[in-house]
């Protein structure tokens, strides 16, 4: 079997595998195999064909893949509105119980309830916002 057929089959297999993985790495190896197919058709010896494949693969993986990955990666989702308050710290301005209370979150005063209804959190304590329920922050004291 001619070597160019082997390289062409390898390129096809890697190309199909890329369709299933979407990593860009197998696609770059497939392109390197296609380039090597052309070199084999020209009639260069197998050692040079292998060298072309290795160099093209290394160049693709080292140079092009980082660019592709940078464009594929999505930034972490940003939280807007009240969902951005979850996880923030707050300052208790009026005692917080399982029924009511007041906290200051990032300069704004909010009605609050203790996340654990059995807790009583005194004014001046620092709490974490666990959840926002309507216009009420459910908070838990920091330890």
Image: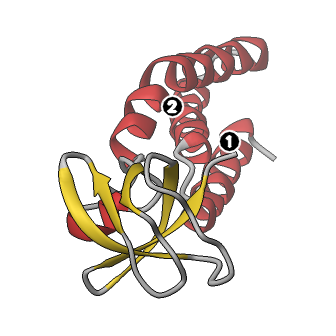
* Alpha-carbon span between mark 1 and mark 2: 9 Å
Q: Nearer the viewer, residue 90 or 53?
A: 90
Q: Vertically, is 76 above or below 55? A: below
The mark total stands at 2
Q: Vertically, is 90 above or below 60? A: below
Q: Residues within 10 Å of mark 2 (few under 14, many from 20)?
A: some
Q: Nearer the viewer, residue 103 or 77?
A: 103
Figure quadrant of residue 18:
bottom right
Q: Nearer the viewer, residue 90 or 41?
A: 90
In the image, residue 128 lies at what x, y percent? Answer: 51, 55
Residue placed at 45% from the left, 38% from the top? 69
Q: Which residue is mark 1?
A: 7
- The disc at residue 73 is none
Residue placed at 76% from the left, 20% from the top? 46
* Quadrant of image for the C terminus: top right
Q: Residues within 10 Å of mark 1 (few under 14, many from 20)?
A: many
Residue placed at 65% from the left, 23% from the top? 53
In the image, residue 10 lies at what x, y percent? Answer: 70, 49
Q: Which residue is mark 2?
A: 35
């Amino acid at each position: 079997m001619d070597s160019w057929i082997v390289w062409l089959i390898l390129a096809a297999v890697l190309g199909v595998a890329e369709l299933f993985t979407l990593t860009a790495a197998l696609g770059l190896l497939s392109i390197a195999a296609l380039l090597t197919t052309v070199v084999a058709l020209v009639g260069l010896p197998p050692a040079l064909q292998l060298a072309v494949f290795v160099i093209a693969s290394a160049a693709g993986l080292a140079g092009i893949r980082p660019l592709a990955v940078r464009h594929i990666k999505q930034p972490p989702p940003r939280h807007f509105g009240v969902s951005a308050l979850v996880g923030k710290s707050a300052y208790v301005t009026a005692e917080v119980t399982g029924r009511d209370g007041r906290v200051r979150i990032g300069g704004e005063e909010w009605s609050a309830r203790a996340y654990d209804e059995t807790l009583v959190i005194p004014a001046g304590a620092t709490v974490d916002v666990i959840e926002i329920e309507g216009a009420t922050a459910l908070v838990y004291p920091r330890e």
